[in-house]
Image (cartoon, rainbow, N blue to C red):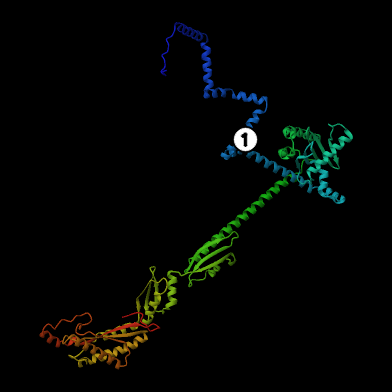
Amino acid sequence: MSDKALPAPPHTETEISTHDGDSDLRKLRELLFARETAQLQSLEKRLDNPVVHARDTSEVIAEALLLRAQKDDMLYIALEPLTEKLFKEALRKSPMDFVNALFPLMGPAIRQSVAETFHSMLESFHRTIELVFSWKSLRWRWEAMRTGTSFAEVVLLHTLVYRVDQIFFIHAETGLVLCHVYDEGVVIQDADMVSGMLTAIQNFARDSFAGGPESSLDSLRLGDLTILLERGSTAYLACAARGVVPPEFRERLRNTMAALQIKFSDELDSFSGEVEKFVSARGDLEDLLDVRYVDEDAPLPLWIKLMPVLILLLFIAGGGYFWHDRQQRYLAREAAQAYMEESLAQVGQEPGLLLIEIRQDSSGHWEVIYQKDPLARDPKPLLDAKGIDPKSYTLRVIPYVSYEADMVTQRVKNRITPPESVSMEFDKDGTLRLSGKASMGWILQARQEALALPGVEKVDTSGLADPRIEELKSMIALVEGTVVEFPLGKDIPVSEDVTKLARAMDTLVRIEKLAATMNVAVNLTIYGHADATGNDKRNYEISQERARTIAAMLYARGSSIPIALYGMGSEQSGGKDEVLPDFRESGARQAAARDDQSRRKVEFKVHIVQLPPDNSMLNILH
């Protein structure tokens, strides 16, 4: 068999007629129920469309909530958790909105509470003044002394109409105290013990005398103390009062009991010992703590009425005085602190002193830290001179080396001890300038020692002069200007220069003696020269012999000057820097060299050297 679908058979005449009948029926139905069909379709669209359905619901939701609220409390029970959650969430997100909303209500309430408290305080003050400054108080004091009771008890006996000391809210079945309030100053016992005793007394009275289960005690009296009992269906109130309680208070007690019975109806019916659920009853019970005195409306004397005003004025005046005194002490403390800081800063500007840190603790004690150069002044006497109390501060000094001009100058003075003829000036770039007159030994030593001091980068001694230097320079110039010539091939000076040589040697001896007084030493260098005649070896030898001859002649005069000898040969004969011409190129030039007497000579060079204590050479002066 093939899976190919067979063609549909053609419609028969019966089927065609049936279809025509259905079409007619549908048309008839549309004619009869067209309006109802349209309404059903519209209703279906409204129910299926959530926007339209929500709009329709919003039109009747207010009336529905109102009707449900009138029927029972299920609407409140259902909305309470949601409302509480929404309120807490809104309060957490925008607390300031609630503050701004409650402020207009809280402000007047707080002001009214303060005003009522102040009014009550004034009334109590009036009553106290009246009791203290009156003949009545004197009589009561005499009565207290006569009877041996306290004055307060006598006053209470004569002035008190009634006073409610304690209120107990007690569960009737178990006898447990649900809430307990009492007036200030009242001596109280254990609340549960009192509740148990009251319950036992009521049960005893009912069983022994009344006999009925619904009977109960209304009051108990113990001396001046009255116990008022107001019973409800599941709880009762016990009120401890002194004096004569008026009937209207009994009515207040009855209304409070009814209100608590309604307020805590569910909690009382299902009570299982959890008294925390009844904490909110404290406010209702505290309203019953009442007190009333006699003559409350009696007019007071004028002087008693004015007494609070006078005391208030005295209080304001005293407050103003104390505020002024406190302000003055604050200003004095601020001025002292400013003076202390200014004084510390001024001392820190002293040469060689540097203010590092100042601290003041909570007690007002100061801690001061300075850096101090060894040559600077001690900061403590400076602070004492400014009137600073030594007990008000702790001073800490850290040593350091100051590079200030005054400190460097003082340090140099202490080290080199300049004479009065020398002045010093220290530049910011670290240059120490010395000017005036001093000995050469001191000049050389001062320059060396000043350079070793911290802060001195350079020493300028161009302004210093030794009066003996000019004499020394002139003698050195005389010696160095003396040229002694020699005959050809000889190491003995020519006869014409013997006198010049003797004068130069005498001058060298004088230089040596003068240098000794100036704490300097003299070194002499002798350069021997030869002409170009002969070979180089012979010229060097003869030049050295001429220098040695002059040195021997100088030592023969008793001089101890250290002498350095140099044989220059024929290379340099006009001084150290003059190069001799080459006369060996021809016989004619050599003959001319033999006739040149000025090239066969010796020259002198004088060196002045500073002598430190260890006799080693430190500095070359010339």
Q: Residue at x 30, y 88 (%)?
A: 508
Q: Secondary structure at mark 1?
A: helix
Q: Residue at x 51, y 9 (%)?
A: 29
Using the image, determine if residue 259 lies above or below residue 544: above
- Quadrant including the N terminus: top left
Can you give x and y, in whole percent of width and height, for residue 268 in the image?
A: 74, 34
Nearest the eye: 87 or 296: 87
Can you give x and y, in whole percent of width and height, for residue 248 in the image?
A: 79, 34
Q: Quadrant of residue 566?
A: bottom left
Number of numbered callouts drawn: 1
Q: Is residue 189 left or right of residue 450?
A: right
Using the image, determine if residue 153 lies above or below residue 588: above
- Going by the numbered disc 1, the residue's amino acid type is Glu
Q: Is residue 206 left or right of residue 443?
A: right
- Farthest residue to the right: give it: 209
Q: Residue at x 65, y 30 (%)?
A: 76
User: Which residue in the protein does label 1 denote?
Assistant: 84
Nearest the eye: 89 or 594: 89
Crowding at mark 1 (Cα within 10 Å: few <14, some 14-19, many 20+): few
